[in-house]
Amino acid sequence: MAVERAYPEMIRDEHYVRHFNGWEGYAHVRAWRTAPHQVTVVISGLGGTCTLENLLPLLRDEYPDDATDFYFHMPTDWTELGYYAALTTNADGTVVQTRLVGNTLTTRLGPTLHATDDPDDDSIGGDSP
């Protein structure tokens, strides 16, 4: 008898580095398989020339057979969960961030979401005490 997972399987946790406009850009990219043909991607730690506008199409192309949901995370300080937003792309390619309230992603993705936060991301104070 198969055991059902309490939370989805994390399938990716990497420091993603690419060249954009001739310069290096990077991000922390994490992904979970939330259902068959469904992937949830959380992006944080943007740096260099990497922007959400140039990163989302590349990541979407990496999962051609899956519906992909994108989220952005920016740490605040160790007393808070940080800033989380759902990401959507307009027809002109601009990315729209819709802030999530509470622990929506933690409930959906489980403990690996916070266990894989980047403790070196000091963009606004870091996630770790």
Image (cartoon, grey):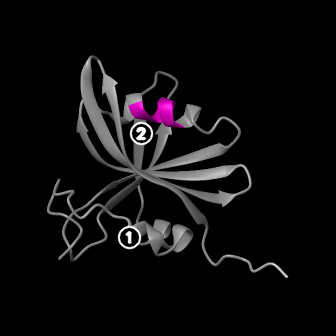
Image position of 2 (left or right of 16): right
Q: Main secondary structure of the magenta part?
A: helix
Residue at image x 33%, y 64%?
117
* Residue where numbered disc 1 is placed: 114
- Whether 64 is among the magenta residues is no
Task: Give the percent coordinates (x, y) of residue 65.
Answer: 71, 39
Image position of 69 (left or right of 94): right
Image position of 110 (left or right of 20): right
Residue 96, disc: 2
Q: CA distance from mark 2 to mark 1?
A: 24 Å
> Which mark is in front, 2 or 1?
1
Q: Secondary structure at mark 2?
A: strand
Task: Give the percent coordinates (x, y) of residue 16.
Answer: 37, 41
Task: Give the percent coordinates (x, y) of residue 33.
Answer: 62, 57
Residue 48, disc: none
Task: Give the percent coordinates (x, y) of residue 95.
Answer: 42, 35
Q: Secondary structure at mark 1?
A: helix
Q: Quadrant of the C terminus?
A: bottom left
Identity of the amino acid at label 2?
Answer: Val
